[in-house]
């Protein structure tokens, strides 16, 4: 992934963290936040942790599809993301973030599937968008067929209009006094 794309993804994740409500669990001089605080099964979440002297941390929860790696953000906090398991039952699940020798905890409250109206974060099945490898075949078919009768008639009409315009302009120049 290019550096511009990584930068834009990081900005989007930080914007999502700042724009949505979060669940906080303060532990000493920093805390863990999960955003949104009440995701639905299969939804994406953003994680944020402050007060960690390291540049990376690992977030673990039974609610996550996979452990989340947090990395240093622009303001010194650690940010990362994960996805909630799609088969998860509604309830509150602990989120444990390990930063060096220390660990902090937070929580995420998973709500039932229909509780939050939102579109899936990404396609969950093959998308019948068309195109793909068939586009080359369609272009080859069009080139092999050539222009049809309608194209020929339109071309002849346009050529006739152009020839008439040239003839009229030439006749007009001959009539003008010099």
Image (cartoon, grey):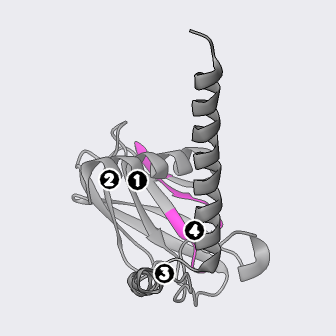
The part of the image, by quadrant, that contains residue 155 is bottom right
**Residue at point 75%, 70% (across, down):** 117
Residue 172: assigned label: none
Image coordinates of residue 162 in percent, x first then y, are 59, 47
**In the image, which residues are magenta?**
26-45
- Residue picked out by circle 3: 131
Which quadrant of the rendered structure holds the N terminus?
bottom left
Please tell me which of labels 1 and 3 falls first in the chain.
Answer: 1
The CA distance from mark 4 to mark 2 is: 26 Å
The part of the image, by quadrant, that contains residue 156 is bottom right
- Residue picked out by circle 1: 9
**Eye-nearest disc, 4 or 2:** 2
Between 158 and 62, the residue placed more toward the observer is 158
Residue 108: assigned label: 4
**Eye-nearest disc, 4 or 3:** 3
Decide if residue 126 is on the left or right side of residue 20. left
Image coordinates of residue 19 in percent, x first then y, are 61, 46
The CA distance from mark 1 to mark 2 is: 5 Å
Image coordinates of residue 71 in percent, x first then y, are 29, 54
- Residue picked out by circle 2: 6
Please tell me which of labels 4 and 3 falls first in the chain.
Answer: 4
The CA distance from mark 4 to mark 1 is: 22 Å
Please say if the residues under marks 1 and 2 sit with CB atoms less than 8 Å apart: yes
93 versus 176 height, above or below? below
**Eye-nearest disc, 4 or 1:** 1
Please tell me which of labels 4 and 1 falls first in the chain.
Answer: 1
Q: Local crowd at mark 2 within 10 Å, few (<14), some, or many (≥20)?
A: few
The CA distance from mark 4 to mark 3 is: 41 Å
**Residue at point 65%, 79% (across, down):** 91
Q: Local crowd at mark 1 within 10 Å, few (<14), some, or many (≥20)?
A: few
């Amino acid at each position: 992934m290019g550096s511009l794309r990584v930068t834009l993804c990081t900005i989007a994740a930080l914007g999502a963290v700042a724009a949505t409500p979060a669940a906080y669990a303060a532990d000493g001089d920093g805390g863990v936040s999960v955003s949104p605080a009440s995701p639905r099964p299969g939804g994406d979440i953003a994680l944020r942790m402050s007060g960690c002297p390291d540049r990376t941390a690992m977030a673990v929860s039974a609610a996550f599809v996979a452990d989340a790696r947090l990395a240093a953000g622009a303001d010194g906090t650690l940010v990362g993301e994960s996805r909630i398991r799609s088969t998860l039952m509604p309830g509150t699940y602990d989120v444990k973030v390990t930063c060096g020798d220390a660990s902090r905890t937070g929580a995420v409250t998973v709500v039932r599937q229909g509780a939050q109206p939102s579109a899936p974060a990404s396609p969950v099945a093959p998308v019948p968008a068309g195109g793909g490898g068939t586009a080359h075949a369609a272009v080859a078919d069009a080139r092999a067929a050539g222009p049809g009768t309608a194209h020929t008639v339109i071309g002849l009409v346009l050529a006739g209009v152009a020839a008439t315009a040239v003839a009229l302009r030439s006749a007009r120049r001959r009539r003008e006094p010099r």
